[in-house]
Image (spheres, rainbow, N blue to C red):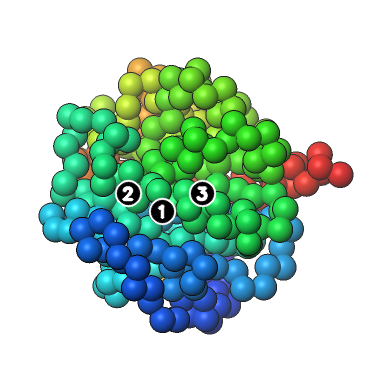
Amino acid sequence: MKKNKNKYILFLLVLLPAFFLSSCTNFSSLKLQDGLEAPRYDESSSWLFKELSPQKKIDVFYVYPTIYGDKSPSNMDIYNQELRDKATRSFKKQTGVYTEVGNIFAPFYRQVSMAVLDPNKDTYKNKNFLLGYKDVSRAFEYYLTHLNNGRPFILAGHSQGSMGLITLMREHFENVKLQKQLIAAYLIGYSVTKEDFKQYPWMKPATGESDTGVIISYNSQAPGAKGSPVILPGAFCINPLNWKTDGTPATASLNLGAVFFKADASVDKVVPHYSGATIDIATGSLTTVLPEKLDTGGFPKGIYHIYDYSLWFNNLKENIKLRSKNYMKSAK
């Protein structure tokens, strides 16, 4: 456990200098909706993280989760330093599963505030969600044109970040070239549905631990938990412990290590064999019985949304390595 913790801390020490180099520049003054400054992706200040000298053969395009909850403005001001810091902390807590295989590219985007969303309406049609998504789309287009240099890539997100990437896949990935470049899409913490796979045939569900060009998605909660805002009818789920898509239980012995973080995003503890997981076929949720009570933040009791990466951290890390290795092997 100590070895894993030290390794992760070493990664952060390597990462932080590059982060500050990539983000500390003059801010853009371009104004758009609600007086918010729009990201200019030709400026480093519009990137939460951008690899300055890519050394790896694979990229990761990462979109951070919902970190903004004020009623006004309706969208995140990406030049608000407090919000930039919150996005950075989320970045540190999640991207450790990707850094061993890929060069990270993570844009700031004007995500919609949780406070202005109506749970009874389709968020994908919400004008404020679409404003943030358009930023993600523009960032991805800029990344492909100026930063990617033809490398294969992983799409990675959580919560609203995954929503943006789901929309991106719907709108952009009919393009066969992009399909061929995609190693996998880790769209965690929101629902990719059976209807998505039917309506957008280029969006393909993962069927095991090693297939490529596919979507990995799940939403963690306690058995019988109610009121999850991220589980939609027909939600697809793959179990990150045994990589099954049916109800086959995975015991805690398969859990390579849950990784928990302090408020400043530094590692608090690494716990091998923390908990098992089973897919609830009726709801499409990933259910788990935890050995302790965890604070679920603003989510209902038993909804472990904020721990979707932490609970299965080391399994995700190993799976990302495996899919990347298989992709590169097949590409030769």
Which disc, if any, is residue 246? Answer: none
Q: Amino acid at mark 1?
A: Asp
How far is the residue under mark 3 from the one under mark 2?
20 Å
Q: Are marks 1 and 2 in contact (CB under 8 Å)?
A: yes
Q: Is residue 133 found left or right of 116 in the rendered image?
A: right
How far is the residue under mark 1 from the one under mark 3?
16 Å
Quadrant housing residue 84: bottom left
Quadrant housing residue 303: top left
Q: SS at mark 1? A: helix
Residue beneath disc 3 = 156
Q: Residues within 10 Å of mark 3 (few under 14, many from 20)?
A: many
Residue beneath disc 1 = 135
Q: SS at mark 3? A: strand
Residues 172 and 306: in front is 172
Q: Nearer the viewer, mark 3 or mark 2?
A: 2
Q: Amino acid at mark 2?
A: Leu
x then y, percent, for residue 209: 63, 35
How far is the residue under mark 1 from the one under mark 2?
7 Å
Q: Nearer the viewer, mark 1 or mark 3?
A: 1
Residue beneath disc 2 = 131
Q: Is residue 293 found left or right of 96 in the rendered image?
A: left
Residue 213 appears in the rendering: no
